[in-house]
Image (tube, rainbow, N blue to C red):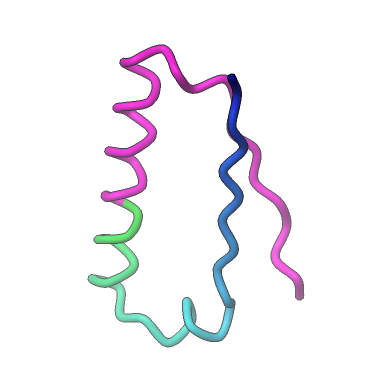
Amino acid sequence: MKFLISMHINPAVLDALTDEEKAAIGDGHGEFIKALKASGELINTQALRRVS
């Protein structure tokens, strides 16, 4: 069984965050991706452009 995880971040919310908050989100996401890779569950990641 395969799953698709789709994430949407509202640009206005992201722009309102402090640099520290953005770093915390990035660090958490990085750890999540690292765990998926280590378990062999990650097939691919793909980023889309910002709406603007």
Question: Is residue 41 shown left or right of residue 3?
Answer: left
Query: Which residue sits at x=28%, y=50%?
Result: 28
Q: Provide the residue span drawn in magenta.
A: 27-52
Q: Is residue 51 above or below residue 15?
A: above
Residue 16 counted in the magenta span:
no
Of residues 35 and 15, the one nearer the viewer is 35
- Residue 27 is situated, as x and y percent measured from the top left of the image, at 27, 49
Q: Quadrant of the N terminus?
A: top right
Of residues 41 and 11, the one nearer the viewer is 41
Query: Which residue sits at x=73%, y=57%?
Result: 49
Query: Which residue sits at x=35%, y=54%?
Result: 26
Total count of labels: 0
Of residues 38 and 5, the one nearer the viewer is 5
Query: Which residue sits at x=65%, y=38%?
Result: 46
Q: Quadrant of residue 35?
A: top left
Q: Is residue 25 above or below residue 30?
A: below
Residue 37 counted in the magenta span:
yes
